[in-house]
Image: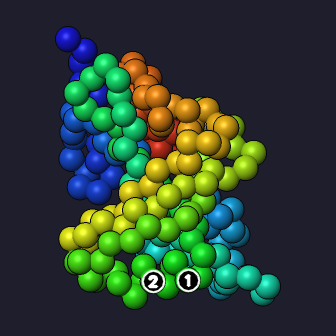
Amino acid sequence: MTKSIEYICSCCGKEHEDWPALGFISPLHYNLLSEDDKQKIAELNSDFCIIRYPDQVDRFIRCTLTQKVIDHCEDLDYGLWVSLSENSFQDYLDNYTNENHKAKYFGWLCNHLPDYIFNDSIPTTVYIKTNNQRPEIVPHEDFDHPFVRDYHNGITKTEAERRIASMIESIEKEED
């Protein structure tokens, strides 16, 4: 039997032994802004991000993605950001507290995951779920990218645990 991965939860500060979700606090576009621009042109909370450039407005929402693990009973969860069109973003925002709202939008993945090279953003379908659950994204299967293939074909338990350890290690380096 494989030893569980132990980690300190960034939310509660306690040690856990289950698999953590691999979450991103913000979209890549926000991370690339200077500290000054983050204050002046951007708004970020746990579910929404808006960046107002002089010539355009970028809108993002936080979503989940569940990666199938083919040789294990637990799947790997991600907390990712996608960009939406103005109309889709507004529809989601207008219905954010509506427990019965269900919708489907086109979105672009807006985080770069470790171990993948991203030359282009990945197109996704964003599924808005009832009961105010965070939306779930599914990468478009016809988009040629290793992450998309891994999503649709599944990964091994060893690969999932390597990704978790890599993410925890990168977070620990940032905190030092």
- Residue 95 place in picture, x, y as percent: 35, 84
Q: Quadrant of residue 8?
A: top left
Q: Can you say whether 63 is above or below 68 in the image?
A: below
Is residue 50 depicted above or below 162 in this figure? below
For mark 1, give the secondary structure.
Answer: helix
Mark sitting on residue 87: 1
Front in this rendered view, residue 69 or 142: 142
> Residue 126 in the image: x percent, y percent?
46, 62
Kind of residue at disc 1: Asn
The residue at which mark 2 appears reads as 91
Q: CA distance from mark 1 to mark 2?
A: 6 Å
Quadrant the N terminus occupies: top left
Nearer-the-camera pick, 73 or 28: 73
Q: Say which residue appears at 37% left-offset and 44% top-offset.
A: 66
Would you say residue 76 is visible in this rendering? yes
**Residue drawn where x is 55% and y is 65% of the image:** 106
Question: Can you say whether 171 is above or below 166 in the image?
Answer: below
Rendered image: mark on residue 30: none
Specify the quadrant of the image occupied by residue 116: top right
Instruction: Determine which quarter of the picture holds residue 93.
Output: bottom left
* Circle 2: element type: helix
83 vs 103, left or right, is right
Q: Residue at x 41, y 49 (%)?
A: 65
Disc 1, disc 2: CB below 8 Å?
yes
Residue 118 appears left or right of 109: right
Please state which of residues 102 and 80 is positioned toward the viewer in this rendering.
102
Q: Is residue 161 visible?
A: no
Q: Amino acid at mark 2?
A: Asp
Determine crowd level at label 2: few under 14, some 14-19, many 20+ residues with C-alpha closer than 10 A: some
Residue 176 horizontal/vertical position (percent): 50, 44
Q: Is residue 44 left or right of residue 38?
A: left
Display coloring: rainbow
